[in-house]
Amino acid sequence: MLGERIGAPQIASGDLLRVAVRDQTPLGVQAKGFMDKGALVPDELVLKLIDARLDQPDAKSGYILDGFPRNVSQAEALGAMLKNRGEKISQVVAIDVPVEELVKRISGRRTCRNCNEMYHVAFDPPARPGVCNKCGGELYQREDDKEETVRNRLKVYNESTKPLLDYYGKAGILSTIEGVGRPEEILHRILDAIGHSTGARV
Ligand code: AMP
């Protein structure tokens, strides 16, 4: 929704990794075991994917990075990468959601194997169970969306990713928004946080 609204591509490290795993590229083969456990994939693999993605023509006038950076060393590498490209981060948005709500959202998530569209078994079910509304593809539960793995991902978040709040807070470019509410409400909070005013009061 955000990408459509501001006309920028969403570049999600997790999506790039899942494509590499699906296509069984050498990088994907190395990444798979880490992903299935809910651990972080080694930085050099992720950085390679992001660097190549930023070279694509649609990333020439801005983009949304999603799920990257995931730790301080990735953030430092990103800073260097952007400096080389004559670019900089305009805003970092942290979306704050209580842990139990996150577990409910992620463990109920179903993803289309074909087009990556996401659903939730209770909050946003497809019209026909197991079938994507958009393309008719098969819906599946990501291995790392099973509850036990989600809890491990949250532990990894606390250990490795949370320090980024301090890192980008000190840089003066962090906004934290409340991530509970309807998707449209949260979208408007993000638009406000990135200075993309809509005039809407939600
Ligand atoms: P996501 O789709 O962002 O939830 O990521 C799914 C999984 O991909 C994570 O649990 C990690 O195993 C891996 N992953 C995604 N982004 C990164 C990243 N920036 N650094 C390391 N591992 C990542």
Image: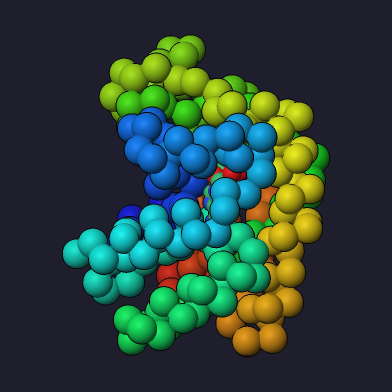
- How far from the left and from the top, in percent, is residue 12? 44, 52
On the question of residue 171 being in view, the answer is yes
| Residue ranking furthest to the top | 129
Give whichever of 39, 180 is nearer the camera. 39
State left or right for residue 153 relative to residue 79: right
| Residue ranking furthest to the left | 57
State left or right for residue 73 relative to residue 112: right
State left or right for residue 182 relative to residue 117: right
Q: Quadrant of residue 159?
A: bottom right
Give whichever of 187, 69 is nearer the camera. 69
Q: How many numbered markers are drawn?
A: 0
Colouring convention used in this rendered image of the protein? rainbow
Q: Is residue 101 above or below residue 113?
A: below
Give whichever of 161, 189 is nearer the camera. 161
Identified at 66% across, 39% down, the residue is 38
- How far from the left and from the top, in percent, is residue 200? 49, 66
On the question of residue 105 being in view, the answer is no
Identified at 58% across, 34% down, the residue is 33
Q: Is residue 201 above or below residue 109?
A: below
